[in-house]
Image (cartoon, rainbow, N blue to C red):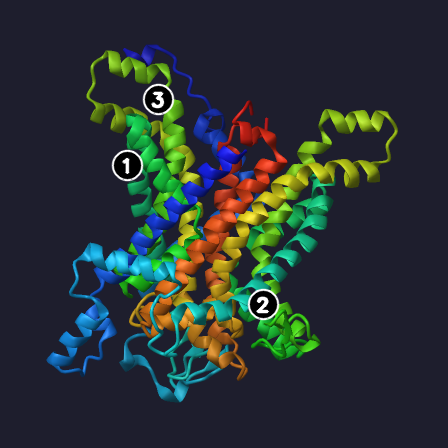
Amino acid sequence: MLQFLVRRLLQAVGVLAVMSLLVFVGVFAIGNPVDVMIDPAASEAERQAAIVALGLDQPMWRQYLTFVGNALQGDMGKSFVYNQSASELILSRLPATFELAVMAMLIAVAIGLPMGLWAGLKPGSWADRLLMTISIFMFSLPTFWVGLLLIMGFAVTLGWLPSGGRGETRELFGVPFAFLTWDGFQHLLLPAFNLALFKLALVLRMVRGGVREQMTSDYVAFARAKGVSETRIVFKHVLRNIMLPVITVMGLEFGNILAFAVVTESIYAWPGMGKLLINAITVLDRPVIVAYLMITVFIFIVINLIVDLTYTLLDPRVRTGGAK
Amino acid sequence: MSGNIPVTKPPFSQTPMGELVSDFTANPFAVLGFFGLLAVIICAIFAPYIAPQNPYDLMTLDFMDGNLPPGSTGGMGQVFMLGTDDQGRDVWSSILYGLRTSLAVGAASAFIAFGIGCIVGLIAAYAGGLTDTLIMRLVELQLSFPAILIAMILVAVLGQGTDKIILALVAVQWAYYARTIRGLALVEKGREYIEATHVLGFSHFRIVLRHLLPNCIPPLIVIVTMQVASAIALEATLSFLGIGLPLTEPSLGQQIANGYGYMQAGRYWLSIFPGVALLFTIVSLNLVGDHLRDILNPKTRRQ
């Protein structure tokens, strides 16, 4: 187990190193940083001074080492726009994005699971066919367009929920969260539901497939023969067996939700890190872009690592590399 | 001579192709999707002939016709079925031209990605060993990050422009093809006919291109259909966020984004109709792809 852990950690560090190199090459080497980071109105002498100050006259490998060294200390430069440390800026927006992603995940499971059970227990019924067709629509609908429709419906026409912003927040352990106040919770609902739709369809399909497979298995037949009630079979035995893959996939999808939050945040003016990134891209605020990428990559690697380790704990076959 | 031999051609419905067609038409949603897709492609190709006006020729626009709701009649007596924007541009015509851009970008990137993915996947499967390991590690690394994130990174790095968007979409998608075709090719590689080609002393080039590749293609068709849909959706998303195609070639995503500003003012048609067109395209592609997958997969194929 320890050996597996160490090997997996080393792999994670390797991926992080590769990604940092790619980001560095992408942002600093392909584009000319001099043009981007220095005011075009500056005189030639000022330009030269700035190049030296930014270390851009150094050979490439030295620049990369400096970049990595600074990144390790959490220093990824100052935002041109906010004139504030880029990494601090992004980390200050992280709770908002996180809150949105967790809420979306909860909605996806809370709705997708019962729907999947329903469809899976009655294969071929009208409900099953209806839900499967709806799930194709959920996969097909671009997130941003659903977002517009939701705003049109629930915010503009019906006026039930606010159309954007985060609303009132309350601090928990010194971090502001919106879901702790009624106003903030209302602001959270629409974007979270929007973000959840795609995952909802995924959970629905996975649970449906899992239930159909499990219901024909020997242990279900055995339980039936023993006279165990159908409700107990479904909720006590079948559900438990399909939860493992669902949890794994949802764990992996969590990173995906964080990335897709960019779209939702832009539509609902939700002040998370995704919105920050889009603004940074449009005004070419490179330090913020780089910091966003590095932090996201880091979060991703951590998520993948956690999912892998959880899986190992839950399923010994993965750990030992034994028979499948 | 040959006339003496009675050749009874089997009816079309019993040929392999005929079976596929009848399997496909058995599902009404698939047929619906197919005709929807056909309509979209025809609209996109013949947009200049179908569209009542050229929305990007400023000479044909009349400010007097601006902001008309759907079904209004313009100053020249023409009817604007889906309304107009503030410059008097016919929304229906804009959608036809936008559909063209969206479809062209989506199809181009899916096919380029398909080509690159095929080559890389075949090399990995055929060469094996270290080459295979290296290529597959790269593929796995890329697939562990969501497509939208990679696309945004690339757009942030490369800058904007049609060619750069296509490049970003290709970079996002090639890995799916590479992984799939490698899996297929590994299976085919072990078959007798490939062994036979080795015995016959064919060149590697010939074996891979003439024998391995054609046998891996059919399952990939499904993936191409789905990937064109996802490329279109991704491009629309990037354009909606304002980091997609340049403003000179407004795709459906951009039209939706532009119209969004007017939504709160009640001019819903500027955003809703391009959205419906986008949705229609993507759903059609997915319906066709979903059912093609079912009928091409021997496991789920109905008896």
- What is the chain letter for disc 3? B
Label at residue B189: 3
In the rendered image, the quadrant that contains the N terminus of chain A is top right
Task: Using the image as rendered, state which of residue A243 and residue B221 is in the foreground.
Answer: A243
Residue wearing tag 2:
A191
Q: Is residue A137 above or below residue A314?
A: below
Furthest-right residue in this view:
A227
Disc 1 secondary structure class:
helix
Residue at the (33%, 50%) spot, across then down: B171
In the rendered image, the quadrant that contains the C terminus of chain A is top right
Could you tell me residue B83's position as x and y percent? 46, 78
Q: Is residue A146 left or right of residue B17?
A: right
Q: CA distance from mark 3 to mark 1?
A: 15 Å
**Residue A273 visible here:** yes
Residue wearing tag 1:
B119
Query: 10 Å neighbourhood of mark 1: few (<14), some, or many (≥20)?
Result: some
Of pointers 3 and 1, the one earlier in the residue sequence: 1
Q: Is residue A302 left or right of residue A216?
A: left
Res. A50 image quadrant: bottom left
Q: Is residue B266 above or below residue A211?
A: below
Q: Which residue type does callout 2 highlight?
A: Pro
Find out whether the residues at labels 1 and 2 contact each other: C-beta distance under 8 Å: no
